[in-house]
Every structure is written in C-alpha cells, then in structure tokens.
Image (spheres, helix red, strand yellow):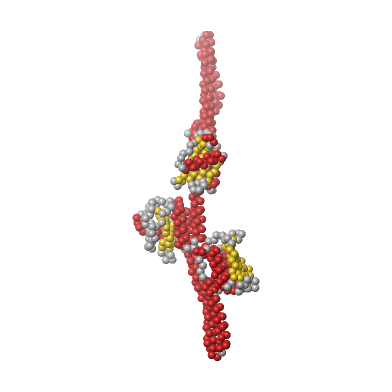
Amino acid sequence: MSRSRVRLGALGQRSLYQQIKLARFWLPVAIVAVVVVHQVVIVPLGGVLWQFWVQILFYSILGPMATFATLNWIASEVRLRERAQEELTRLYTELQDSHELLSAIQEVTGASDLDAALKAASRGVVKVTEAVGAAVVIGSRGPPLSEGYGLDTALAEDAGDRDRRLRAGEVPPEEGGPEGRLRVLSEPISWAGEIQGSVHGYFAGPPDARQRESFRILCAEFTSTAEAVRGRTRDLLTLFEVDRSIRAEGNLTRLLQTLLTQMMARAGAEAGGVYLADDENLIELHAHHGLAESPSNVAVRGLVRRVASETSPHLVAHLSEEERASGGPILAAARSALLLPLLGDEGLLGVIVLSHSEPGRFDEGGLPFLNLLASQVTLAVRNARAYLQSEELAIVEERARIAREIHDSVAQSLAFSALKLDLVARLLESDPAKALIELDDTKVTIRELIKEVRRSIFALHPVDLERHGFVETLRSYCSDYSQQNDIGVELDIEPLPNLTMTSEAVLFRIFQEAMNNVAKHAEASRVAVRAGRTEDRHAFVEVEDDGRGFDQDEVDGRVTSAGGLGLKQMRERVEGRGGSLRIRTAPGQGTSLRASLPE
C-alpha cells in the first residue's frame, strides 16, 4: 500500500511538471483567444452602456475565476507531492527501524556464547525500542546470570525482583523504577516447559505498539539463541564426559555402560543396549540400561539384525508388533526406537539401540550428534579390543620369559646343585671333610636360589591400583620391598596431579621395573624413592640407588630378567603416553631413574 502511494505521488510530480511546462504555451494563447472573442464578438453586440458593463463583468469575474482554477489545480498537485514526500519519509523511518531490529537480532543470534548473547540482547532492546535501559536475567539452577545496559543500581535490583516474580507466576506491573516513574515491559524466557529467565525494558513513557512489537521479537530471538547455546554447551559437556570416560575406564563392560547412559540422557531414551559382533559376526548384548530385569542371551534378529546388515542408522517413530517381538529385550516394550551401527575400518563392530515407550520420541535433528557419540563408542570398543589383544600377547611373552628365566637360572642352578649333592654322597665314604665343604657350597647356592625365586615372585606379584590408589600402593610396595630384599628404602611423596588409571599403571610398572633391577643387579644398600608433580604439571616417580651403576650403552637394548622390560622398552612405553624417561648412571656411581607422565 505504501509503495503504491509513493508511485502515485511520483506520477503526480511528473504530471504537475509536464502540465506547467505545457501551460506556458497554451495558457497565454487561450487568454488571448478569449480576449479577442470578447472584444470582437461580445462587445460589439450592444451600445456604450452594454460595452461598459460587459468589460466590467469580464475582467472582474472571469479573470479571477480563471486565476482561482489555475491556482487550485497547482495547489492540488503540490499537495499530492507533499503527501508522497511524507509517505517516503515514513517508509524510510520504518526501514531504518527494521534495519536496526534486524541488526540487533543478528547480534543476538550470532553470539558465540551465552554471555555474548546476554550483552547483545540488552544493548539491542535499548537501541531498537529507544528504552532508557534493559536487563536480561537467565538461569534456572544456581545463581542466575544477568546483564544490564543503561541501568543504575536501583533499576538492576528492580529487574532482579521482576525476574523472581515472573518465576513465581506473578505478572509484574508496567510501572517501575525509582518511585514508579518509568514504564517497564517484561517478557519471560521459557524452554522445556519451564521459565529459564526474563527480559526487562525500561521506558520514559508508555511504549507504543512499535516498541512493544520490537521488544517481543527481540525476546523471542534471544530465547531461541539461548536455547541453542545451551544445547551446544550440553553437547560439549557430553563429549567431554565421553572422552574422560574412555580415558579413565579400562573395563569394556563398565565403559559401554557409562557411554550408553550418557547417550540415553542426550536422546531422552528410556531403555538402551549395546550389541557387539564377534569374529563370527554373531551379535550379543554386552551392556544395557533401563530394563526391569537382566535379559538372557537370545538370538538377535529382526530390526537389530537388519541395521547390522545395512550398516545405516534407523529411526523408527512407530514400531510394529512384529518389530517389537523380534527386536530383542530393548524393543520388547518400546513404541519408538533409534538404532545406530558401530562401524570400524574392519567392518561392523556392533549396534546401539535406544528405545522409548511412547511413539515419535526421537527426531532426526539429534542424529548427527548421536552418530558422533556412536563413533566415540566405536573408538572405545576398538581400543578395548586392541588392549585385550596386547594383554594376551604380553601374557604369552611373559610366560615365555618366565620359562626362559627358570631354564637359564633356577633350573640350571638346581641341576648343578643336584650334581653337587651326588658328589657329596660319593665323598662321604672316601673324603668326609671335602664332602662337608661341597655340602656347604651347595647350601649357599640353594639359599641364593631361594632368594632369586622370592625376588621373581615379588616382582610378578599383582598390585591393585584401582582399589588402593597409586600413592598407597607405592607405600605398601616400598615397605614390602625393604623387608623382602634387605635394602633400606627412603620414601618421599608430594601431592600428585590427577592421572588416568592407564597412566597410573604405566608409571607404577616403570617404578616396579626400576626397583626390581636395583634388587637384582645394583648390589645397593639404600634406595631413595620420590614421587610428586613437576612445574609443568607432570606426575613423576624417581628411583635412586647407591649401587654399582652400569654402562647405559651396554644394557640399553637388553630385556631385564624379572620385569620383562629393558631400558628401551621402558622409554618407549613412557614416551608413548607423552611422558619422558631420564636415566643417570655410571659404573661405580649408582643409578638414578626418573619417569614422568602428563596430567
């Protein structure tokens, strides 16, 4: 409507200009023609009296009437032009207001975090609605976040009071501020069925319809932005928790249980399960949550089997009776379901099944993030299986090493002792004195073998880090070590940073290897053990003995007889987790070994 008026006004301006331009020619000609007709035709019709009155009437009536008509026509055209200008001015003002509103909305929606959105919303309300000041309060749990623009202390307190009243279900009056001199617009911020905060704008006078509409639009946009920021923050926190769980938990079943619970909370599912495939592609339920009772192992078929074969996500808003009956325990009582395959480089690893007793509870908008979480579960499964394989390989290698050690040391020494005893038996009749000497030597050898076997057993004795913690396990080991090996141990433990279970196990394994090497090779009388935190927040363990030391170049590639790790393997294991290993030694000068791992 406004644009059509502007076009009409523009046409009126062109018509006025063209007509005046033409009137410069035709109006003088018309006047001359009228005068000629009057003088030639009208005036000669009568006598002198007639001619006198005709002239008076012509110039006193017809002339002013023509002038009036001409000026009236010009005035109407000018009025049209003025109206067009007024319409253009009004339209420009509306466009400018709309531009300011869109700019404020863009600032709010483009905010990277909630704090930036709060500031943009409070500034935008003042800028767009010409308010004296504005306040935005948000937060349903704990102290709320608030941001004000153009507010003094009294108005800030008034905004907080209005927020509390809105949360309590009251409708605060429009009068507010010092002595009620200002008018206030208040709008609640709601999502998930709850009031999460409020926006308040303070005006010097009653706000008009445009100001009210702009205020409501800004509040709606801020609500959408705040909810989106909250969703992004929740997703980041979920990813952080998932990553921390993967790093901290070594047991696959407990890890799957934790990740499944986090995925169910994110998707709003009532029940869930993780099915894993074995080498023969048989799918079994390895973790579940939300079931009334533990399910028995049954053959997996139906929807779960179809997702496993198609390796693509499935979102089912309405489960059929057949799908529920054949879908296993997770889908037995469900009406809607979400199934996510776990895909690795080697193919299918399993399927995650989430379900709800109501239809249509899952939406496609959450699929990308849930697929991302499923990829994290895939990574956890692959790492756990790789760890199990490495453990099995380590067990095989350890068994081979123990067999080699028994054969090379204990078995040979026992065989030699048996030969010595046979010699003693023969010497008892011929040379009893020499027999006693050989018997004493055999006793010494057997005692050394007993010590060697005890050292090996102590070195292989399992430690329960998960139960007792790193520090207490360290204390207990040092106490037992001193009694077992008759070596004095000085222990100094400072506060350590937080480490994952895997990092603690690696650090303790290196410490255990170092202590066992001291017992077997160092011939030391004292060993000092220190543990703590470095300046760059690394946890460290240092073992320093007063033994005979060694040449690093000679023993660096060897494998120790008790722990199964040479210096090279010890360094690789520590550096593989981002740490470092430092060894200082020389023949006759003792040995210092220091291992550190990042927090």
> Residue 346's spot in the image, x, y percent?
47, 63
> Residue 49's spot in the image, x, y percent?
52, 8
Report the side of 282 relative to 60 (left or right). left
Residue at 45% in and 47% down: 192
**Total label count?**
0
Report the side of 587 relative to 29 (left or right). right
Residue 279 vertical placement versus 415 (above, below): above
Which quadrant of the structure image shows residue 339? Answer: bottom left
> Residue 371's spot in the image, x, y percent?
46, 56
Which quadrant of the structure image shows residue 295? Answer: bottom left
**Residue situated furthest left in the rendering:** 321
Residue 139 vertical placement versus 350 (above, below): above
Foreground of the two, 460 or 132: 460
Residue 41 vertical placement versus 225 (above, below): above
Foreground of the two, 151 or 381: 151
> Residue 181's spot in the image, x, y percent?
53, 34
Q: Is any atom of residue 462 visible in this view?
A: yes
For the C terminus, which image quadrant?
bottom right
Q: Is any atom of residue 311 visible in this view?
A: no
Residue at 48% in and 67% down: 389
Foreground of the two, 532 or 263: 532
Residue at 56% in and 88% down: 432
Residue at 46% in and 42% down: 168
Foreground of the two, 29 or 586: 586
